[in-house]
Image (cartoon, helix red, strand yellow):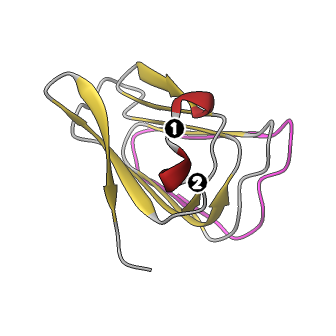
């Protein structure tokens, strides 16, 4: 599923059975969910939940990370737990050895 517009506060977008691609930003108070991976080509301020159907190989890719919360296959991390070094950075979030892990991606 491809979304061509910003996802505003209070909106919730769910891509059942597929990946979700956001070609803009996700505002604080918005939620994006997908059974597959999530790609955000703007800033992620809201919440992103990938692998909603239990897919532990799902990932979240963001151009600029500043999320309220992220989750993969039900394992959550609150945005307040992010190290300052990750804020505003391009990143991918994946599940590895039972933990959510962040990795840098090229700008």
C-alpha gap between disc 1 and disc 2: 7 Å
Say what secondary structure mark 2 lies in.
loop
Q: Residue at x 21, y 40 (%)?
A: 57
Extreme front residue here?
Answer: 84
Q: Position of residue 66 (x, y in %)?
A: 64, 50
- Residue 99 in the image: x percent, y percent? 26, 26
**In the rendered structure, which segment of residues is drawn in magenta?**
1-21
Q: Is residue 22 above or below residue 58?
A: below
Say if mark 1 contacts mark 2, CB within 8 Å.
yes
Labels 1 and 2: the sequence-earlier one: 1
Tell me if 3 is positioned left or right of 75 in this view.
Answer: right
Assess disc 1: are there few (<14), some (14-19) or many (≥20) residues with their C-alpha within 10 Å of its C-alpha.
some
Rendered view: 4 above or below 11: below
Residue under label 1 = 82
Please say whether residue 15 is one of the residues in the magenta stretch: yes
- Residue topped by disc 2: 87
Q: Is residue 44 visible?
A: yes
Locate the C terminus and report the quarter of the image it occupies: bottom left
Q: Residue at x 47, y 66 (%)?
A: 90
| Position of residue 5 measured from the top left corner of the image (x, y, whole percent) | 76, 67
Q: Position of residue 59 (x, y in %)?
A: 33, 47
| Residue 74 vs residue 76, the one in the foreground | 76
């Amino acid at each position: 599923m491809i979304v061509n517009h910003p996802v505003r506060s209070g909106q919730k977008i769910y891509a059942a059975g597929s990946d979700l691609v956001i070609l803009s930003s996700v505002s604080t108070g918005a939620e994006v969910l997908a059974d597959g991976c999530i790609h955000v080509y703007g800033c992620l301020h809201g919440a992103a939940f990938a692998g909603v159907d239990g897919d532990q190989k799902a990932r979240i890719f963001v151009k600029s990370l500043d999320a309220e919360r992220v989750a993969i296959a039900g394992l959550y991390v609150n945005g307040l737990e992010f190290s300052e070094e990750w804020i505003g950075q391009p990143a991918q979030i994946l599940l590895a050895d039972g933990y959510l892990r962040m990795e840098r991606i090229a700008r």
